[in-house]
Amino acid sequence: MAFLSGASANEEITLYTHRHYESDQALFEQFEKETGIDVKVVKASADSLMERLKAEGGNTPADVLITADAGRLHKAKEQGLLQPVESEVLIERIPANLRDPDNNWFGFTERARIIAYAKDRVKPEELSTYEALAEPQWRGRVLARSSSNIYNQSLLASIIAADGEKEAYKWASGVRKNMARPPQGSDRDQMRAVAAGLGDVAIVNTYYLGLLLNSDNPKDKKVGESLGVFFPNQKGRGTHINISGAGVVANASNPDGGKRFLEFLASDQAQESFPESSYEYPAVEGIQWSPLLESWGQFKQDDLSLSELGALNAEAIRVFNRAGWE
Ligand SMILES: [Fe+2]
């Protein structure tokens, strides 16, 4: 068996990701081309990837964890699953509120948790804040998913941060009373329920509306077309945003390759691809949005440091439970 002189196994990194976009694959290939580092991808649900990282400990093949929601990334950090990455590129490119203060994780895309409303039944002037959805005029009209979902936990954490626990409790129990049905299903299911006339407004992440509007399923496309986008709290702290982000795994065998991958995700090229491919907002400022994101309009973001969402996660879960939001 002959080996070419100087040839060696290619350097590689292994990604644990729960993102399910085909476009991510194209990005990974681009990274391979640019760096010569082979990318191996392991896909599973966010929770099972975290469990796996914990169970594998020092034997994990993973170098990078990619997952959504700062609350979840914070949890990964608390569990010792990530390590700090010292990178001037990341510090310069990623806004401070979208990354861990100790550099264990960085946000690469943003999503806003908005109010999607039935255009034929609701005027945007009737909407104002998340808080206002707890008012009696919305009785029987609100759709929202379960409180076991991290997106709602992070939204409530942001309300705790802004209004305090007492007001957050009042909000959660008020919205629960206003629901058109007990919480169930995904963000997309909430919008389908609004389109079906079950209720009038739904609390959802922006990219899910993008997914509906670009769906191959004509029914879903129609659901998307029947809905308007409302960015809450524009006159106050701004709309709650969250991230999809990544960090280098604590027991990574190729932490330098992992760091290069994170820097690649912050590059113009990667950032420009997200609005088109997954209907997410780029985390890096000054990157061109897609026509769809432009059509939803510019909006003021709540600039709360997203690490706070993780810090307040347990409290948010307690408040949901007390409020009876299943
Ligand atoms: Fe999602």
Image (cartoon, rainbow, N blue to C red):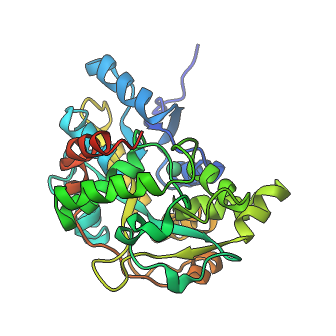
At x 43%, y 82%, the residue is 299
Q: Position of residue 135 (x, y in %)?
A: 40, 68
Position of 37 with respect to 260 (left or right) is: right
Could you tell whether 198 is left or right of 269 in the image? right
Along the line of sight, which residue is nearer the eye, 105 or 128? Answer: 128
Which residue is at a point 60% across and 53% down the rendered structure image? 190
Picture quarter with the N terminus: top right
Q: Decide if residue 74 is on the left or right side of residue 153.
A: left
Q: Residue furthest top?
A: 1
- Percent x, y of residue 51: 36, 24
User: 41 or 110: which is nearer to us?
Assistant: 110
Report the residue at 33% width, 18% height from top. 56
Residue depicted at 55% across the width and 78% down the height: 289
The quarter holding residue 206 reads: bottom right
Compared with 169, 8 (above or below) is above
The extreme right residue here reads 218
Please identify the quadrant where the C terminus is shown: top left
Q: Nearer the viewer, residue 64 or 289?
A: 289
Whole-percent x, y for residue 313 in the image:
25, 45
Q: Quadrant of residue 263?
A: bottom left
Residue 111 visible within the image: yes
Residue 173 screen position, x and y as percent: 34, 52
